[in-house]
Amino acid sequence: MAPAADGILDSPSEDAAPRLAVVAGDPDRRPWLLLHGTDGSEADLVPLAHRLAPGAGTIAVRGAVRTTGGFAHFRRRPDRTIDEDDLLARAETLSALVSDAVTAHGFRREPIVLGYSNGAIMAAAIIALRPELLGAAILLRPLAPFGSGELPRVPGLPVLLVEAADDARRRPDDAERVSRRLGDAGADVVHRRLRTGHALAEDDRIAIAAWLLARPSLDR
């Protein structure tokens, strides 16, 4: 099967259901919902989450779309634009699965979602569809999930958005668009721009750790 955009396989028959790998932690702390990037897997962000919040539970998602190097959370068109209908349908499915997992595993607080690249777009889509599921969001290298339409009100939702100055896969205004739309919806947005590329770097961990340190109530 030949790859299409971003190494995504052409046939939807190659897709699988999202897989959730849940590790129980302190039920009174927020679990971390982990959404990897294109060609990734559910294991990718677990070490970072464990460094940032030792002892917290994790809900690590394997994307439903098979790629040449792993998985993604939604499909793109051949020109690399987001297939918004596909993203909408998959975000609704994933939101329901996450809600069920939080209940089934006895987590008492809404998760912090940590999404990278393709996963950051999915995280932003969940904010647009089911913001009540989340306690906070960390969006690394995001794009706006939907081209038009207002976001629901998310008053005070803590959001950290991290873009990269040398990111060849993003336009200069991509992160600003996401930041502005979330801010207009009432989110408490912190927008950081790092001197790095699209790949995750140690500076990302440092930026997230500083953001969490300034918001101790997120983990209580």
Image (tube, grey):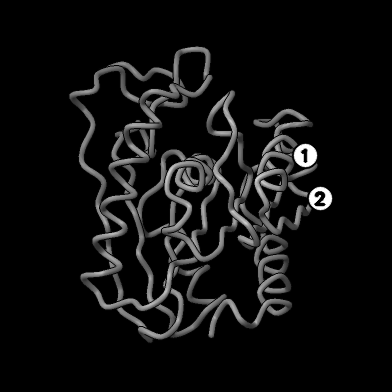
Left or right position of 149 against 18: right
Picture coordinates of residue 126 (x, y %)?
Answer: 45, 46
The reply to whether callout 2 and callout 1 are in contact (CB within 8 Å) is: yes
Which quarter shows the N terminus? Answer: top left
Question: In the rendered image, which quarter is residue 110 located in?
Answer: bottom left
Picture coordinates of residue 197, whole percent (x, y): 71, 43
Q: Quadrant of residue 174?
A: top right
Give me the residue at 61% from left, 35% from top. Answer: 143
Q: Amino acid at mark 2?
A: Arg
Instruction: Tell me residue 86's x, y (percent).
Output: 36, 26
Label 1 environment density (alpha carbons within 10 Å; few <14, some 14–19, many ≥20) = some
**In the image as oriented, which residue stretches furthest toward the left?**
13
Give 38 or 185, whichever is nearer the viewer.
185
Residue at (72% x, 62% y) in the render? 203
Task: Check residue 104 in the rendering and tell me which mark sits there, or answer none.
Answer: none
Residue at 42% from the left image edge and 75% from the top image edge: 109
Relative vertical location of residue 20 with respect to residue 3 in this rendering, above or below: below
Disc 2 packing (10 Å; few <14; some 14–19; many ≥20): few
Q: Is residue 197 left or right of residue 20?
A: right
Reply above or below: 126 against 82: below
Is 201 displayed left or right of 34 in the figure?
right
Q: Is residue 6 above or below residue 1?
A: below
Task: State the mark number for residue 166.
Answer: 1
> Could you tell me the amino acid type at mark 1?
Asp
The answer to which of 19 and 68 lies nearer the viewer is 19
N-terminal label among 2 and 1 = 1
Which element carries disc 1, helix, strand or loop?
Answer: loop
Percent position of residue 18, x then y? 26, 46
What is the secondary structure assignment of the residue under circle 2? loop
Q: Which residue in the structure is indicated by mark 2?
A: 195
| Nearest to the observer: residue 151 or residue 3 | 151
Kindly report the distance in space between the C-alpha atoms of the residues bearing marks 2 and 1. Answer: 7 Å
